[in-house]
Amino acid sequence: MNDNTYAAGRLNLPFVGHCTFAKSPVCTDWNTINADVAILGAPNDMGSQWRSGARFGPRAVREASTLFSFGHAGAYDFEDDKMYLTHDQVTMVDVGDADIVHTDMNQSHANTNAAVRQILAQGAMPIIIGGDHSIHIPVIQAFDQQPPLHIIHIDAHLDFVDERHGVRYGHGNPLRRASEMSHISGMTQLGIRNVSSSNRSDYDAAKEAGSNILSVRQVRKLGVADVLAQIPAAERYYLTIDIDAFDPSIAPGTGTPSHGGFQYYEVLEIIKALSQRSKGQIVGIDLVEVAPAYDPTGITAILAAQLLMNTIGAIFYDRQQAAN
């Protein structure tokens, strides 16, 4: 939509029309994806071990994203003095959801994996909205034919459990499973904190696998520049963001809230700095654990949508600058 169309056509307010992410066009034929970004829902919360409900996360985040989607030809950030999300920088489509088969985690993960592989085969950047954090396992596995990735994991919890009572693919396991994949070059885990995150042996295993773990208080003490200095200068990064990385005061709608979390700009500034340093080589994102039933105000889904919109804007602005 260009400026003339916006001025003369439909006003298209957030509460009008079909509810896709950022009011992006729908593409249900995954063999014909023609966009820079493909938004995929993975509404699977069978991996949750306490409060379920993240299966409704994709719908809630999509609806919240319409708040930031008035059809303008880009978004001006006066602090950065930059235009983001212009039509010459990035195009997006919403490809719907991976098919989830209730009670069948293996098939549901297989369907999610196949969907992400199809997005990658079409040359688009996959952005996946969960669902609980177990969906990270099939998503990151789908990158196994791509060059190596360094994972930036933003979360309250380490998610490095190996196996408990035979469970290997729940929402406590995803970073352990990712660490076992040959295309993962390393991990930086930010925001990990407090009780009930994991046991000592899991922390030891993560460090042995090469993970760098920083708590919220350590991130605050270091500041953005020093945190960035601890992230290897890899060519390609993947972001996996659990909404419970944020403090429950701004993100109450999640299954496993943990006090002492990040505020919005603490996370966004790290992501934007990483994108700028890497010239936009963040090549995939999943955002998980939004459970709207625990947040009647809707601020958790709004936070998730706002973070994704700003992250997409930064990545593709930096890619455009690098190409010029």
Image (cartoon, rainbow, N blue to C red):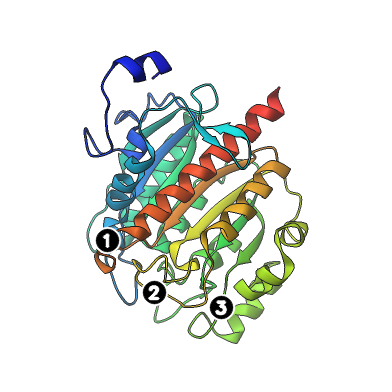
Q: Are marks 1 and 3 in contact (CB under 8 Å)?
A: no
- Residue linked to disc 1: 104
Secondary structure of the residue carrying tag 3 is: loop
Identified by mark 1, the residue type is Asp
Q: Are marks 2 and 3 in contact (CB under 8 Å)?
A: no
Percent coordinates x, y for residue 123 in the rendering: 51, 29
Q: Quadrant of the N terminus?
A: top left
Please state which of residues 2 and 276 is positioned toward the viewer in this rendering. Answer: 2
Residue at image x 63%, y 47%? 272
Percent coordinates x, y for residue 224 in the rendering: 70, 59
Nearest to viewer (mark 1 / mark 3): 3
Q: Which of marks 1 and 2 precedes in the sequence?
A: 1
Q: Check residue 295 in the rendering and tell me which mark sits there, or answer none.
A: none
Q: Which of marks 3 and 1 precedes in the sequence?
A: 1
In the picture, residue 228 is in which quadrant? Answer: bottom right
Specify few, some or many for label 1: CA neighbours under 10 Å numbering under 14, 14-19, or 20 or more.
few
Q: CA distance from mark 2 to mark 1?
A: 23 Å
Q: Check residue 256 in the rendering and tell me which mark sits there, or answer none.
A: 2
Q: Quick check: 121 above or below 299? A: above
Identified by mark 2, the residue type is Thr
Identified by mark 3, the residue type is Arg
Q: Is residue 111 visible?
A: no
Residue at image x 42%, y 17%? 3
Q: Quick check: 187 above or below 29? A: below
Q: CA distance from mark 2 to mark 3?
A: 13 Å
In the picture, residue 62 is in which quadrant? Answer: top left
- Residue linked to disc 3: 193
Residue at image x 58%, y 50%? 238
Nearest to viewer (mark 2 / mark 1): 2
Percent coordinates x, y for residue 85 in the rendering: 50, 32
Task: Indicate left or right for 43 with 237 as reference.
Answer: left
Specify few, some or many for label 3: CA neighbours under 10 Å numbering under 14, 14-19, or 20 or more.
many
